[in-house]
Image (spheres, helix red, strand yellow):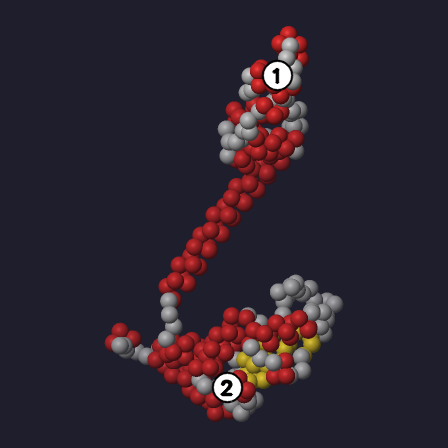
Amino acid sequence: MFLNPQIRDRLHVDNNDLLNRLLDGEPAPAWTKRPNAKDDLRDRARELRLQGWTYDQIQVELGCSKSSISLWVRDLPRPERRDPSEQAKLASRKRWEHELAIRDEERQRTKACATQEIGGLSDRELFMAGVALYWAEGTKDKPHARRERVTFVNSDPDVIRMYLAWLDLLKVGREDIRFRLLIHESADVAAAENYWAELVGSDRSAFGKTTLKRHNPKTVRKNTGDDYRGCLVLDVRRSAELYRRIEGWWYGIVGAATASDLRNRT
């Protein structure tokens, strides 16, 4: 707080009686006040009180004491008393939001730890993972429908990246891969085509004609939004021999995994 001489100098009033009369009963000028670290909390508490929040709710939101809140908002009108059932719902929702935040932290922590557990990936590990990935997502030959062709379809960019890394490991050249897009007609087709071309590092000339899925008015689509880019189809040319090897590799993995001497495996 400034002393009277300082105020006198600022106001250029040399008469002390006049100065005292000017200051008598008047609050200190704003420029004489020092900023308070809790000013923002006070303003927020008053804002919440005017919205009808209780002291308990404001305390949980701001993390300050009820005594401070009482001093800050005591001049404001009391909020209307809510129906007890409504208060219970609000309290329950607040607890649930808190619980969801804790669960999300645990979820992210678990994922981060699991990611670290993988570490590096050897060529053999990538080879085995790629065989399993293809057998889960790639097209397969059937006795009633011969399809000895390596064709892979997926909408997940990370899955596509891993599949391409696997094909690189198998020495499949990018010039032997033909790309094609499957997408709903209501999507931004041009943007999706550009996205996949950039992701696979290929010119659009390597892409075949996009297949558009017609809209069914009876169906409620969930694959909408800016992140919907359809499915990418990857066909390996002249791949009958490669397909046969993939099938053989897969059954080799199955046989090794289900062998009766698991405890003696080295």
Q: Is residue 44 above or below residue 14?
A: below
Front residue of this view, candidates 12 and 83: 12
Q: Name which residue lies at 58% across and 72% down.
A: 155
Asked if residue 184 can be seen in this view, the reply is no
| Residue 182 shows in this picture | yes
User: What residue sits right under mark 2 in the picture?
Assistant: 173
Where residue 203 appears, as percent x and y from the top left, is: 61, 80
109 relative position to 32: left or right = left
Mark 1, residue position: 8
- Camera-side residue: 66 or 79? 66
The label nearer to you, 2 versus 1, is 1
Task: Mark 2: give few (<14), some (14-19) or many (20+) Cα within 10 Å.
Answer: few
Q: Quadrant of residue 42?
A: top right
Q: Nearer the viewer, residue 107 or 180?
A: 180
- The amino acid on which the numbered mark 1 sits, given as a three-letter code, is Arg
Q: CA distance from mark 2 to mark 1?
A: 87 Å
Q: Is the residue 204 above or below the residue 105 in the image?
A: below
Q: On the rendered image, what quadrant is the N terminus found in?
A: top right
